[in-house]
Image (cartoon, coloured by chain):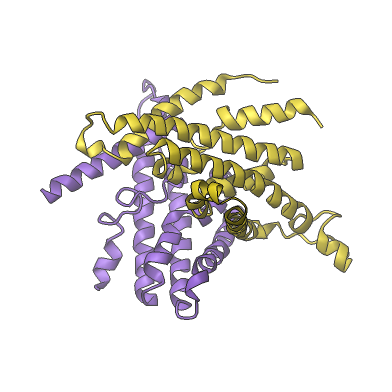
Chain colours: A yellow, B purple
Amino acid sequence: MDFNQLIIISISAIFINNFVLARFLGICPYIGVSKNMDSALGMGMAVVFVMTLASSVTWLINQYILKPSPSNIFFLIFATEQPPDLTFLKTISFILVIASLVQFVEMVVQKASPTLYRSLGIYLPLITTNCAILGVALLNLDENYNFIESIIHGFAAGLGFTIALILMAGIRERLDLAPIPKALKGIPIAFLMAGLMSIAFLGFSGLKIR
Amino acid sequence: MSVKKEFFKGFYKENPVFRLALGLCPALAVSNSVQNAVGMGVAATFVLLCSNSIVSLIRSGVPKKIRIPIYIVVIATFVTIVDLVMAGFAPSLHKALGIFVPLIVVNCVILGRAEAFAGKNSVFYSFLDGLGMGIGFTLALTVVSVVRELFGDGKLWGIPIFGAGFEPVLLLILPPGAFLTLGLFLAFFNWLETRRVN
């Protein structure tokens, strides 16, 4: 286990390839839930939680059910000549797993901690169609991360999303009081702010880490 | 309900990107070149057409409570088809679009149309709605990408437009350019709309 590798993965997921500002994933919640600080924080926490969970579960599914490897579960049960290649099912299986995972987490949180449910609850159903969650699962596959790396990548990507969301919420709370042209009110000004933040985050791409 | 109205509403009046602010992730991510934008638009239009038709066909048999998961499975099936076909016949486009091809499945335009229109209307109108909305989505992506590629790279569809002396605005091709261009377009359409109303 290379500890440096994990640090590189997290720094690059949080700053250099920030999910919102560099990869354009999860724009809908970024614009929709950044109107005030409390909801931004709640949404951010929910995303970190679900992303970490989703990266671990989808990694396991890919490794033991979809990938044509000797540890493929169908290969072990049916003892076919060759391990079956089911990777074409990744889109369908991942989105279903994420949808049911979110539903399941919602039920568990509701039973286990009603206070947490009150702060996270309303954001959880929104997360199913958040492209950042499916995106992190697919990126883990593209980058060939192992199990630990996938979990760290999911956690760091969620953290990067939360940072961008909270920064945006802080700016937008001030923007409500500022005199801005009528046509720019709402989403357009949020996009222009995101553009400026993206320029700032572009500075991180010069970062050399080893 | 008229044929013409259902088909053309997606072009301007209910344009998914500019008027409804849906499907913004792909609109930002693949609008760095016109080729990518049109490729993405065509792929999403195909998925939208097929999913709208199928959702409308099965609408009477779908229980209300689990309709969203069913819609997602229908959409994911067509996304997988697009993914495999694109990987086979247009590998360079498939590589350029990257994870945004499988991510069509969570494009809010498609699930939004299934939920708001196809689940309630007949197959013919759902087909028209899907086609109109898909073309509107493609148009929006193309408009944004024309601005970004023309000024950010000095090219259009990969062909150099300006002479050798042209200094491209590199920022427009980079991620910030996507936010700024789309933000200004959204503001422009807001302005048009308020002018029309008054």
In this view, the residue in front, B196 or A30, is A30
Across and down, in percent, residue B19 comes to 29, 50
In this view, the residue in front, B128 or B74, is B74
Across and down, in percent, residue A184 comes to 26, 36
Residue found at x 37% / y 46%: B142
Across the whole image, how many numbered discs are drawn on residues?
0
Residue found at x 48% / y 77%: B58
Residue found at x 40% / y 41%: A31
Residue B157 seen in the figure: no
From the viewer's perspective, tell me whether residue A170 is left or right of residue B196. right
Q: Is residue A81 above or below residue A37?
A: below
In this view, the residue in front, A158 or A192, is A158
Across and down, in percent, residue A6 comes to 72, 30
From the viewer's perspective, tell me whether residue B192 is left or right of residue B133. left
Residue found at x 82% / y 61%: A73
Question: Residue B172's image quarter?
Answer: top left
From the viewer's perspective, tell me whether residue A150 is left or right of residue A15. right
From the viewer's perspective, tell me whether residue A113 is left or right of residue B178. right
Question: Residue A72's image quarter?
Answer: bottom right
Q: Is residue A23 above or below residue B162?
A: below
Across and down, in percent, residue B11 comes to 29, 56
Residue A197 seen in the figure: yes
Residue closest to the far bottom: B60
Question: Residue A12's image quarter?
Answer: top right
Q: Quadrant of the N terminus of chain B?
A: bottom left
